[in-house]
Amino acid sequence: MLPRCPALLALALLTAACASPEVQPRSPSTPRVLTPPSLRIEPSRLIPDLDAEPPHGVEPDGTKRFLALQMRITERPDGSIRKASGLLPAGRSDLLALSLPSRLGGGYLFVSATTSSTQLWRAEDWLSPLESLVRLSGRYDDVIAGFDRLYLASRRANTSTVAIDPASGEFRPLGPLPMPTGQGPMVFADAWRAVSVPDFRGPLATFDAGATWVPLGISEAVESLS
């Protein structure tokens, strides 16, 4: 019996080595849940028909500026349209827009004039947020960019021309305007040259920022300047 033991032992080891390994059962995998993306519904935006609106100006790159239905809108040459987030006030008011020269800080001035009051806002560019500048009693039909201040004039005989600071909105003296200052038109070419039509004196011109005014020798009545 002893000589057969090594053979039996070897056979037992060989059988164990060739046996199939025990298969472990797989744990059930958790199914992956797919969540559909959330839908964000933006509010509708009303854009007026710009073909029927004259532009308020054109940028050097061809972008047109519009003021329609209290909205400030730009239209690029490729047809893309942008709208400012804020609206100008509604109601029975006339809306004016003025591009301010660099001597007054640049940007744009927006004016809402009703029968009883006039309100002004500034914006760094056409679509920038509006910054309230001043609210005045009375109706002012025209805003003029002067040498270093803004002039507000009215067609009404009982409303005098006033001047305000373009940055703070505070009242300022009329400055170097020819006297008497009445309801006549005036236009400023730059920080030095201007033409004004004061009462009873006819058109006057200055080339030194208002230090001196000289007659233009025009006897006919001048109703507007450009």
Image (cartoon, rainbow, N blue to C red):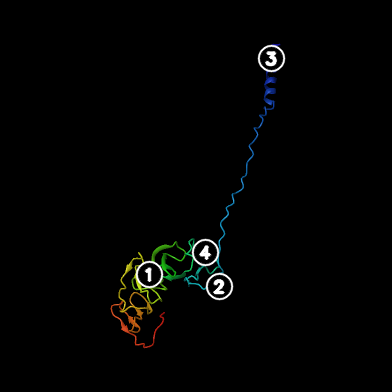
The answer for how far apart the CA atoms under marks 3 and 1 are is 112 Å
Label pair 3/1, CB-CB below 8 angstroms? no
Residue 94 x %, y %: 46, 70
Pick whichever of labels 1 and 4 is earlier in the sequence: 4
Residue identifier under label 3: 5
Residue 7 x %, y %: 70, 17
Q: Nearer the viewer, residue 190 or 86?
A: 86
Against 37, residue 169 (above or below) is below
Q: Which mark is residue 52?
A: 2
Quarter of the image where the N terminus is located:
top right
Label 2 packing within 10 angstroms: few (<14), some (14-19), many (20+): few
Identify the amino acid type marked 1: Ser
Pick whichever of labels 2 and 4 is earlier in the sequence: 2
- Say which of marks 3 and 1 sits in front: 1
Label pair 3/2, CB-CB below 8 angstroms? no
Q: Nearer the viewer, residue 174 or 225?
A: 174
Label 1 packing within 10 angstroms: few (<14), some (14-19), many (20+): few
Judged left or right of residue 78, residue 22 is: right
The answer for how far apart the CA atoms under marks 4 and 3 are is 97 Å
Pick whichever of labels 3 and 2 is earlier in the sequence: 3
Against 179, residue 67 (above or below) is above
Label 3 packing within 10 angstroms: few (<14), some (14-19), many (20+): few
Residue identifier under label 1: 102
Tell me which corner region of the image, top left, top right, bottom left or bottom right, holds residue 131: bottom left
Label 4 packing within 10 angstroms: few (<14), some (14-19), many (20+): some
